[in-house]
Image (cartoon, helix red, strand yellow):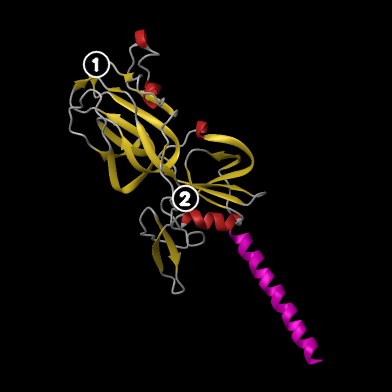
Amino acid sequence: MRFGIYQGLLLLFKFLQTSAEQCTSETFRINPDKRNVKLRGFTYRIFEKISPRTCFQKCIRRKRCRSYNYNRASLRCEINSNPINVFEGDFQVETGYVYVEVDHYRGDPLYDPCVGNQCARGEVCKSLQNKKFVCISEDNTILNKEPQNVALGKISGQSSLNTMYASERASENAVDGLTNTFSHTLLETTPFWWVDLGNIYNIMRIEIINRSTVGQSLDDMSIFTHFKGPGKDGEHLVFQRNPYTDGRFVNLTITNGREILQLTEVMVFAYPIY
């Protein structure tokens, strides 16, 4: 008889526990901003086999994370570091995915476990039992191998082009892997050249001439280094900064008046971010 009572209590406990979980799940609802699409080119960390709620938590605990892509079938979570503006062309159709932006959930205690999060970019907010939190450095694993030139063959552009020599002086000549071709702008004020690496990378060094900047979109750039110059013909310069910088776009600019910007090759050595 006593066993039956304990068994009944155990079943009641399981029923109450399940009901509480269902209630929590019902309260915690996230409405996707987009369905059957994913943001491409801005994913910096991937988590496999996790629930929708855990994916949301992975993102909102990181100040760097602005949105995520989630696939319910494969339980794959891709957290994104968005640029200031996201355009329709940044999305690709992918059946089964949802896209969620988290910024409008920040500060809401129902969704945000770290209200008032003061953690820096690159840190993760961890909640404590006393309702306080700590900031822990995020572990972005660097593979034990040499960084690769991730600019090779990528999409590029420049401020101007002499149409008489369009193919001979185009921006892509600076990322074709050849040293007998070059890009060339017109004589103009503050000429520039840029390359889209296609994804966010942990940039170790940039081998270029003139001023260089790195950012996650072309309207969100920060100075990587500055070369006072002037540059000499055939000169090979290497720029490296510590701590390393994560970014997707590299922009080169001459800032001292009317000049011509010509580049034989631009190499960006970096690791992918997982």
- Secondary structure state at the residue bearing disc 2: helix
Q: Image point 30% across, 36% down: which residue?
A: 213
Q: Please tell me the numbered disc located at residue 266.
A: none
Q: Image point 47% across, 63% down: which residue?
A: 113
CB under 8 Å between discs 1 and 2: no
- Secondary structure state at the residue bearing disc 1: loop
Mark 1 or 2, closer to the camera: 1
Range shown magenta = 1-29
Is 248 on the left-hand or right-hand side of 56?
left
User: Closer to the N terminus: mark 1 or mark 2?
Assistant: 2
Q: Nearer the viewer, residue 272 or 193?
A: 272
Position of 207 relative to 125 (above/below): above
- Which residue position is annotated with label 2? 104
Find out whether residue 251 is within the magenta segment.
no
Name the spot of residue 161 as percent of width and height, x first.
Answer: 34, 15
- Which residue position is annotated with label 1? 187
